[in-house]
Amino acid sequence: MSDFNKESNPKKGLEASMSSGISRKSFLKYAGATAVAASTFGLVGCEDDDPVGPVMPDMVNLGTGDIGILNYAYALEQLEAAFYIQVTDAGTFDGDDAAFMEDIRDHEIAHRQFLGAVIDSIDPDARIPDLTPNFDSIDFGDRDVVLRTAQVLEDTGVSAYNGAAHLITESDAGEAYLLQAGKIVSVEARHAAAIRSMINPGSADFAADGLITTDNGLDLAASPADVLSAAGGFIENDIDFSGLPQPQVELRPITFG
């Protein structure tokens, strides 16, 4: 089993659940030429060394329909769980901050385990494998870098759930998936708000100006293509999301900063 799914004895259940210092090269790893492949083929992380077409080593296919959406969420939860496991192992935080990071870690592990179990209950062969993280650009001994990275990941996660909810099928099973996704995204939003308060205590940053739109008070929703382009720099695997349902509403592009 990869470090991505290393356990840390989660004690919380599911229901409990770019800034300086982050390498821009890593975070925007899949921009430029690979953005063409992503938009054309629904791929993230492919390197176009072949003049005939993109080379796709270690390709992970998310699948189609509701399974594809569940695998999409599962991939993001793998990423977040791996990040917070490394954060807590690094010992950068102490006191209440350390306890808070441990709580987030346990929430993300619970989310990851829950989504994996749901997919297994439908079709064990459909669940994507353990992914391989790439946090080489992150100095886990630097509190500010860790918090800014956490902010990016949490904001990405919230926008991902918001943007994928309407892609779930209108069925009894789909309604059940939507209910559980709503429970998860509410916890992710709490994480995002708390991280922002840790970065700038006593401020109104928890309200995430620019991510929560001022005209209607609704949180940002982003397409799988935008989310995977943003988060893909922290994942070694190439992700094929071409089988996911296409967004039926116009979503605002991600602009994290």
Image: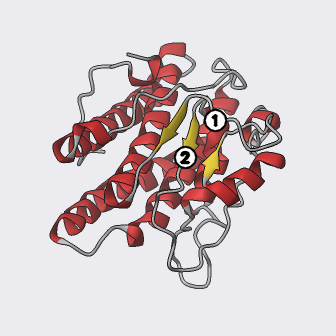
Name the element at disc 1.
Answer: loop
Q: Residue 17 at x, y = what percent? A: 31, 45
Which is closer to the viewer, label 2 or label 1? Answer: 1
Q: Nearer the viewer, residue 146 or 111?
A: 111
Q: Which residue is mark 1?
A: 56
- Residue 7 as seen in the image, left or right of residue 231: left
Tell me if I can see residue 134 in this picture: yes
Name the element at disc 2.
Answer: strand
Q: How many marks?
A: 2
Q: Which tag, 2 or 1, sits closer to the chain's start?
A: 1
Q: Are marks 2 and 1 in contact (CB under 8 Å)?
A: yes
Q: Residue 145 at x, y = what percent? A: 69, 31
- The residue furthest bottom is 215
Q: Residue 159 at x, y = what percent? A: 53, 60
Q: Is residue 20 above or below residue 209?
A: above
C-alpha span from label 2 to label 1: 9 Å
- Residue 185 as seen in the image, left or right of residue 135: left
Q: Nearer the viewer, residue 116 or 106?
A: 116
| Amino acid marked by disc 2 | Asp
Q: Residues within 10 Å of mark 1 (few under 14, many from 20)?
A: some
Q: Residues within 10 Å of mark 2 (few under 14, many from 20)?
A: many
Residue in the image at 54% along x and 58% along y:
224
Residue in the image at 64% along x and 72% along y:
252
Residue in the image at 34% along x and 67% along y:
168
Q: Which residue is mark 2?
A: 240
